[in-house]
Amino acid sequence: MGLIDEAIQSGARQRKACEILGLDSRTVQRWRTQDIGEDCRTGPSRVPRNKLAASERREVLETVNQEKYRDLSVKQIVPRLADEGTYLASESTMYRILREEDQLRHRGVSQPRTSKAPRALVATGVGQVWSWDISLLRSPIRGAFYYLYLVMDVWSRKIVGAAVHTHESAEYAAALIDSSCRLEGVLRDHLALHSDNGGPMKGATMLATLQRLGVMPSFSRPRVSDDNPYSEALFRTLKYCPQYPEGPFLSLEAARTWVESFVGWYNGEHRHSGIRFVTPNQRHQGEDVGILANRTRLYRAARRKHPERWARDIRNWSRNEVVRLNPKRNQTETKAA
């Protein structure tokens, strides 16, 4: 109760404070009304009728730890016991007992595949962190697709490279990254390139090109799309924009023409919510500084003119100076430049 009172005095809501402490707000209200002064919760008052006896619990542990069962999972142990005419407990009960005894470990020589989250990348300007991926575009042939390669600068959200091909290829990917680096004038050892774990991303030609250009590769975990959020969001914007065709692209050239027009619209006209609703080109070229400053002056003037209409401060039009890719708590961040 003292912690809750302290949180409320600091400006927190009682319901939120109760949630953090694992209490119901109505319980706290009852304690205040009754002036009990201490926690009177007693927990469950009855033992479940289907709970195993202590002797049955010991029998389960002794059985699963026998030499012939100790390297098997519970899913394998239960049917083998049934074939021997023995029933000790259900699978879920065995799993619960092993978990409570801290014996729920992977059994056998092989170990489950584990993967670490990608290292956090930080961008404070253009040409420091890029993200890229490949998406499918429908073709006139059912089951066949065109492959869209898109590269974006994470800091400015500008699409710095785009290509459409008939198949996935590390050679196509390497050529796109090479040309994009030359067009953007990327300095050696200043750029980190993030992607997923697909074949074109980790192909020998692609990795050799990155090494030649002095680009640091970064990869998502297998089957974890959240590790590449900027490219995923870009593809969603592409496929849900009003200009996206309802039917398939009739030819490879038609797909390339449409993608070229989309890149021009996205970079030059689309106001991006992640960069204070300026266009990627404006942020990439530094024009957003003056635009955002003008918006701030406009809003302050409007507030001075009618202060009664503003319950709070004006909208935040300050520039986002730092952009993070895959930030994690208690994880070292890598600054790309």
Image (tube, helix red, strand yellow):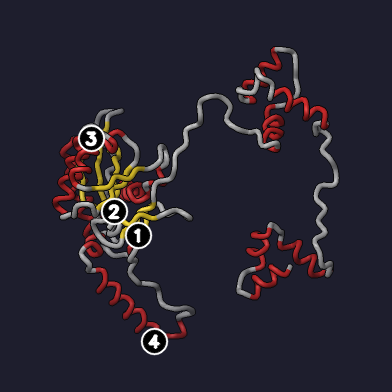
Residue at the top extreme of this rendering: 84
Label whose residue precedes the other's in the sequence (4 or 2): 2
Label whose residue precedes the other's in the sequence (1 or 2): 2
Which of these two is toward me, 72 or 293? 72
Give the CA separation, mark 1 to mark 2: 9 Å
Label whose residue precedes the other's in the sequence (4 or 3): 3
Mark 4 in CB contact with mark 1 (< 8 angstroms): no
Looking at the picture, how far across and down is residue 159, in whole percent?
24, 52
Q: Which mark is residue 170?
A: 3
Dot 1: within a 10 Å radius of its alpha carbon, few (fewer than 14), some, or many (20 or more) residues? some
Amino acid type for the residue under numbered disc 1: Val
The residue lying at 34 percent from left, 43 percent from top is 219
Looking at the picture, how far across and down is residue 188, in whole percent?
19, 52
Q: Which mark is residue 129?
A: 2
Q: Under tag 1, what secondary structure?
A: strand
Mark nearest the camera among 4 and 2 is 2
Q: In the rendered view, tell whether residue 83 sits above or below residue 132.
A: above
The residue lying at 64 percent from left, 70 percent from top is 7
Q: Which residue is mark 4?
A: 304
Q: Which mark is residue 323?
A: 1
Q: Quadrant of residue 133?
A: top left
